[in-house]
Image (cartoon, grey):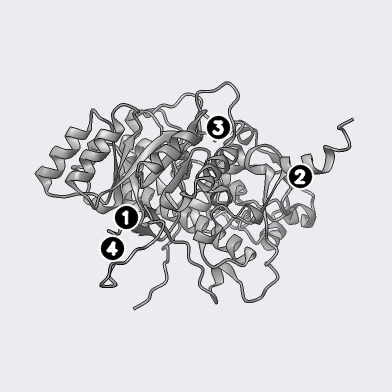
Amino acid sequence: MFERYHIETKPAPLLSPVVSKFKIIRQENCINCGCCLRSCIYDVHQRLTADPRRMADPEHHLCKNCFRCIQECPAQALTKIINPDYRTLGNNYWRNELISRIWFEAETGRIPVLGAGYRGKFGGAGFDGMWTDLSEIVRPTRDGIHGREYINTAVDLGKKLPRLSFNAEQTLDVTLPPIVEIPLPVIFNPVPLPESFQPLQESFIRAASKLKTFAMTPISFLAATQNYNAVIPRLTSETAEIFLSECNRSNRLPLIVELDYEPKNTAALWSRLKKTWPNLIISVRLPFQPGVEKTVVALTQQGAEVIHLYADQEGKELNTSQPRFLKELVRSVHLSLVEKSIRDEVTLIVSGGIAAAEHIPKIIICGADLVGLDFSLAVALGCRMCVKCSWTDCPARLNKITTDWATQRLLNLMGAWRDQLLEIMSAMGLREVRRLRGETGRAIFQEEMEKEIFSDKFSG
């Protein structure tokens, strides 16, 4: 029986104190009348449990910046400021508003709401300079997460044939390559934190299993995990023998493995694995760096099924003094494959710098099939992107978490992000995420618009 894909969410509050954006200061002239309690729909204000005659300290992290409590206070006893600790949260790319948004999504599984509306930029560097087309938002038959029309977010991992051919008996004359479908265009990468944080990996695997997707894992986790079909082991020429021995010993084989690209060894290792297990899907992990387009085209022409392209944690190109951003990199690789008429023959996974729900449809529009998440998973568990990372002195208390709690936080995050993907696709009038790939006509790019509008005016 057909069953809609659903992510089960439930509240999972942070273990560490939340660094709220706003601080509401209750001054001494408060008359404890309770007007703030009655006016606030977000439960920021409550009475003291021990003494209901008095107001408790505000729950700052629940504030949505609507100002209603301040406006309705008869004694003018409430003042709101930006939390000084909030200003120091994150860095230039993983900004404080992105981190606090992920915390909310991971705690509640809901789409964030801002009481005073969006007050940020409408353009800028990176993903801020890319605007998606929401022209179908007025159509009443498209209603996203509310579900009168089903919107499919499933994608395929594997190689597709350019054409089908049949023999004289009208049966297929070609061998169909292995393909795995996942219901969400997301997989989990190993989080690039110090080695002491590796116990978190089991949470990523368990969450991936519940989501029916995959988690990239080091070889060391392969023998211990019970969710074997939810892992993608990462292999190098040095660890391949360990993988082969483990598979022979346990008589178990994952659906997909990933090879770190090594120009001298990858082709031989790929051939060896394919000869041993023809139905094993093999991904090749490749950094975004100068000349990546030619490498991707060459690997696809040689038979690569899945290519995993990764940038740094800020979505920038590696190994160059003038790095391009992720969206330009993906568009360039995608168009290189289109020019050779081989785009449909390979699956492109893209990772690095995916820090918000909106980044998923944007990078798919640029030409990716799906994304790999890394630092956003750590942020979902409370990570504050500290300059100096310490397992024993972690302010997010990541060394104290339980696997069940962490798994639920990840499920909540993916539930909120999928709902936002559904809303964006609904507003575009799309019912299939596969159709979004490479559809750059569904977006406006700030750099191109500025060039088109202003280039003639300043050319002479």
Q: Is residue 23 visible?
A: no
Q: Residues within 10 Å of mark 2 (few under 14, many from 20)?
A: few
What residue is shown with label 1?
Answer: 209
Report the side of 216 relative to 48 (left or right): left
Task: Tell me the residue that label 4 is attached to.
Answer: 173
- Disc with the residue nearer the chain's start (2 vs 1): 1
Task: Judge whether 459 appears above or below 138 on screen.
Answer: above
Tag 1: amino acid: Ser
Q: Residue 313 location in percent, x, y?
A: 50, 33
- Tell me the residue that label 3 is attached to: 316
Which badge, 4 or 3, is on the more N-terminal residue?
4
Return the residue nearer the eye: 417 or 67. 417
Count of marks placed on residues: 4
Going from the N terminus, do you reach mark 4 or mark 1 first? 4
Q: Does the CB distance between marks 4 and 2 fall below 8 Å?
A: no
Disc 3 element: loop
Residue 459 tag number = none
- Residue 48 in the image, given as x and y percentages of width and height: 57, 53
Instruction: Check contact, mark 3 vs mark 1: CB within 8 A.
Output: no
Query: Which residue is pictured at 63% across the width and 38% down the height?
Result: 126
Of label 2 and label 3, which has the lower sequence position?
A: 3
Mark 2: amino acid: Met
State if disc 3 and disc 2 touch (CB < 8 Å): no
Amino acid type at mark 3: Lys
